[in-house]
Image: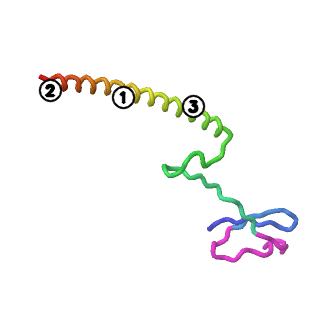
Amino acid sequence: MPIYEYRRQDGTTFEILESITADPLTEDPETGQPVERVLHAPAVHFKGSGFYNTDYGTRKRQRETKESAEKGTEKTDAKAKEKKADTTSSSSSSSSSSSSSSSSSSD
C-alpha cells in the first residue's frame, strides 16, 4: 500500500498509508480540516542500451559533448588518412598487375 501526502489549508502536510483503490481524503482525520492530496513527480532514470545519456541534463553535459566531438573528429581524420593510404597502395598494386598482364599478352 502506498503512502500518500496531504496538505492542510494552513500549508502543513501529513502522510497516511492508504490503499490505491481508496478514495482520497477530503478532511484531516485528526483535526477535521479540509485537505488535498499532494502529487509529486516520480524520480525515474532509465538505464540500458535503449536510452541515451544525452536525454538527461547535467552540468557536465556540455563538456562531454565537446570532448566526444573532438574525439569524433580525430577518428574521422584518422579513418580518412587510412582509407587514402589503402586506396593509394591498392591502385599502385593494380597498376603494376595490369602492366604485367599487358606485357604477357603482347608476347
Which comes before the other along the chain, label 2 or label 1? 1
Which of the two residues, 11 or 18, is positioned nearer the viewer here?
11
Question: Which residue is depicted at the point 52% across and 29% down?
Answer: 74
Coloring scheme of the render?
rainbow
Which label is found at residue 105? 2
Question: Residue type at mark 3?
Answer: Glu
Q: Please, what secondary structure does the residue beneath circle 2 have?
A: helix
* Position above or below: 76 against 93: below
Q: Single out the mark in the foreground, 2 or 1.
A: 2
Which of the two residues, 97 or 53, is positioned nearer the viewer here?
97
The rendered magenta stretch, by its main secondary structure, is classed as loop
In magenta, the rendered stretch is 17-36
Left or right: where does residue 101 sit relative to residue 64? left
Identify the image quadrant of the C terminus. Answer: top left
Residue lying furthest front in this view?
Answer: 106
Which label is found at residue 87? 1
Tell me residue 89's x, y (percent): 33, 24
Q: Which residue position is annotated with label 3?
A: 70
Identify the image quadrant of the N terminus. Answer: bottom right
Residue lying furthest right in this view?
Answer: 10
Question: Residue type at mark 1?
Answer: Thr
